[in-house]
Structures are given as C-alpha cells and as structure tokens.
Image (cartoon, rainbow, N blue to C red):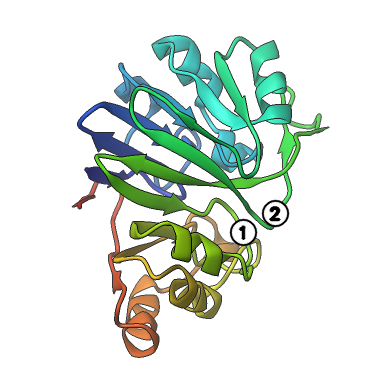
Amino acid sequence: MEIRFHGHACFEIIGEKGRILIDPFLKGNPAADVGPEHFTHLDGILVSHGHSDHLGDAIELSQKTGAPLICVFELARLCARYGAKTHAMHIGGKHTFNFGTVRLTQALHGSVFEPPGEEESFTYAGMACGFLIQMDGKWIYHAGDTGLFGDMELIGRRHPLAAAMLPIGDNYTMGQEEAVYAATLLRPSYLIPMHYNTFPVIQQDPQEFIELLKRKFPASKGEILAPGQSLII
C-alpha cells in the first residue's frame, strides 16, 4: 500500500484493488503539489467534513471520475444536489467497497457545507468524522480534524494500525502534545502528521513533533511527508 501526501489533510491511498483520495483540498491550497486535473481515475473520495479545506474539490472530482463521495449522510445529501455521486455512511458504520473496507469514526469538530460559488452561505452538514480504512489487509486511520478523545484507545485495540494520520496544527485541532498522546492510545506502526503550516494560525515545526514522539512513544515511527512524497507500508 502506498500513502501519498498532497498537502494539508489530503492523502491518496493506492492499493492492489484501487485508488482513493481523502479530503481533496487542492485548488486554493498553497501546500498542494497537484490540482484536481491530476486525477483521472479514482475508486473512492473520502471526505471527513464539509469545511472547504477538506471537502475541497470532491464534488468536481466525483463528477469527473465517477467515484463515489464517501461521507456522513447529511453531507452526502448536500453534495448530491450539486451533482456528486455519493455513498452515505455514519459514525460506527462500515462498508466494503471494491478497493477495501471503510469504517467511520467520531471526530471532535464541526461541519458546514459551502455551496459551490456561494462561499458566504453555510448549511449544517452533520457530524465530522474520521476514517478507518482496510486495504491490502492493512488498517490505516485518518483522524480528520479532531481533538483528542479517549475512544482512540478502542480504535487502537480493535484495529492493529499500520499507519495513522493525525492533525498537529493546534487552534482548530489537536496540537503536537495531544497528537503524541493520541499515539499512545492508537499505537500505530507509523504516524504521519497533517493539518499544519497551510495557514499562519496552524504553523508548527513537524520535526519538533517527531522528536517529541521519539521521547514519549518510540513504538510509533513518525514520518514527515512533504507534498508529493509517499510512504510504502
């Protein structure tokens, strides 16, 4: 399995049975290494919540590739109005797709939908979520935007995680210390920081995070990915 970072919280996951994209904030993202035109084939588009820096180009990509937009029910209904193909789910549920299995987890965050071309118009878009994804026999966890929560321990107990992607930017999400504590609950083999340095308010030094992780929980190996870089697991 290949985990390829495209900036902010966007990851492309490439497995033996398919290719998915998570939180495709590409246009308007100063950290993105590619635009939506880069993707010609996708098997699924996972969106953790409706904020524009996560929903991003998901509707356009669904229309272009025919891939289903996989998200909570409320956000799926809203995106379908604008032409996206959708597969609605909700927290705790799982579904097996051609590319693998997806289970939605809670995330401590908000969610609104901004209609395309109507950025000043907000609609409540249900709960934010994270994703547990099983591909090629391995589980990975994309936490979405979230604060620290105790049930991360249950996630780690029930799913041996090959990798976890956690936000470290603080202000809107966990910061570095909370993300390291989350690692002690989740116990992933690899931990990839995300959701930092895209905007001034979430500036962080990822190397400080890696050093903190080494001191506090060396069982997880921290991996900093620059946009365009990949981790093979």
Quick one: label 2, few (<14), some, or many (20+) residues within 10 Å? some
Name the residue carrying label 2.
109
Q: Determine whether 186 is above or below 54 in the image.
A: below
Q: CA distance from mark 1 to mark 2?
A: 5 Å
Give neighbour class at mark 1: few <14, some 14-19, many 20+ (Cα, 10 Å). many
Above or below, 32 relative to 57: below
**Residue 116 shows in this picture:** no
Which label was assigned to residue 94? none
Q: From the viewer's perspective, tell me whether residue 179 is left or right of residue 232.
A: right
Image spot of residue 148 (x, y percent):
61, 69
Q: How far from the left and from the top, in percent, is residue 126? A: 75, 37
Q: Say whether residue 213 is left or right of residue 25.
A: left
Q: Amino acid at mark 1?
A: Thr
Residue at the front extreme, as displayed:
158
Q: Residue at 37%, 80% (x, y): give it.
A: 213
- Disc with the residue nearer the chain's start (1 vs 2): 2
Q: Secondary structure at mark 1?
A: loop
Residue at (45, 64) in percent of width and height: 156
Report the side of 18 relative to 209 (left or right): left
**Residue farthest to the bottom?**
215
Question: Horizontal and vertical percent for residue 167?
Answer: 50, 61
30 or 95: nearer the viewer:
95
Would you name the residue on which mark 1 appears? 146
Which secondary structure, mark 2?
Answer: loop
Q: Are marks 1 and 2 in contact (CB under 8 Å)?
A: yes
Rendered residue at 48%/54% (across/down):
198
Residue 76 in percent (x, y) is at 65, 24
Three-letter code, disc 2: His
User: In this orientation, does residue 184 appear?
Assistant: yes
The image quadrant of residue 91 is: top right
> In the rendered image, which quarter is residue 135 located in?
top left
